[in-house]
Image: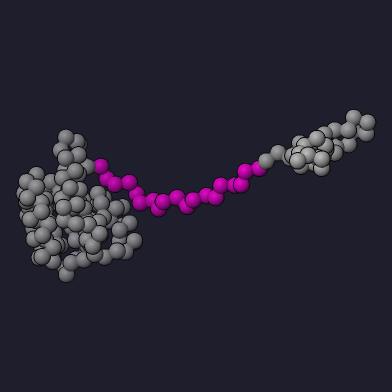
């Protein structure tokens, strides 16, 4: 298995590379978007870990280029960024990213496990399907309060009007002589 890390932050790329290599995954790196596109075409990695903010182009632009090219369209791309912006995240998923992870929310060991799991899932499968369009989670609908039937009443057989039930005069609360 081979993973391409595209990130202009050399320390981040080196940290991820070390974690992936320790898990038995071959790693190649690119330090900008155009180099990432070129490396993906020439090296044909099993997956690309792609930074969103780079000096030459956004990760979403690299993703678009990779998905538009028949040579690289089926290579899974996971965007990883410190930039938490919902529109960029939504756009990445719509363009075919398999995931969008915030760097500050994931430890290297967890990233390695996520990559291994995804690569394992993909090993025996057909080419990667395009991601479903982004749909926001549904807004919860309030549940209506339950309705209860009216309290039972006794019917007076003489006038056919409804009257409330009469208390039993023998109950302890009603009987003054008890106790």
Res 117 → quadrant: top left
Classify the position of the N terminus by image quarter.
Answer: top left
106 sits to left or right of 30: right
Query: Which sits in the foreground, 170 or 1?
Result: 170
Classify the position of the C terminus by image quarter.
Answer: top right
Spot occupied by residue 73 in the image (x, y as percentages of width and height): 19, 48
Spot occupied by residue 124 in the image (x, y as percentages of width and height): 16, 35
Does 78 appear in magenta? no
Q: Residue at x 22, y 61 (%)?
A: 103
Q: What span is colored magenta in the figure?
A: 129-147
**Residue 173 drawn above or below residue 112:** above
- Predominant secondary structure in magenta? loop
**Residue 62 drawn above or below residue 157:** below
Q: Is residue 151 visible?
A: yes
125 sits to left or right of 159: left
Q: Residue at x 17, y 47 (%)?
A: 113
Spot occupied by residue 158 in the image (x, y as percentages of width and height): 93, 31
Res 30 → quadrant: bottom left
- Residue closest to the far right: 158
């Amino acid at each position: 298995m081979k993973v391409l890390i595209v990130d202009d932050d050399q320390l981040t790329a080196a940290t991820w590379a070390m974690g992936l290599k320790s898990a038995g995954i071959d790693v190649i790196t690119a330090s900008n978007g155009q180099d990432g596109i070129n490396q993906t075409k020439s090296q044909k990695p099993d997956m690309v870990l792609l930074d969103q903010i780079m000096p030459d182009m956004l990760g979403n632009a690299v993703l678009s280029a990779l998905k538009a090219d028949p040579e690289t369209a089926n290579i899974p791309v996971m965007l990883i960024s410190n930039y938490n912006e919902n529109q960029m995240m939504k756009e990445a998923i719509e363009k075919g990213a398999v995931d969008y992870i915030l760097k500050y929310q994931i430890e290297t060991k967890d990233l390695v496990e996520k990559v291994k799991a995804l690569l394992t899932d993909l090993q025996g499968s057909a080419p990667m399907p395009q991601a479903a369009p982004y749909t926001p989670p549904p807004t919860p609908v309030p549940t209506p309060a339950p309705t209860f039937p009216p309290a039972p009443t006794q019917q007076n057989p003489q006038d056919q009007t409804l009257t409330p039930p009469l208390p039993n005069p023998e109950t302890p609360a009603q009987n003054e002589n008890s106790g």
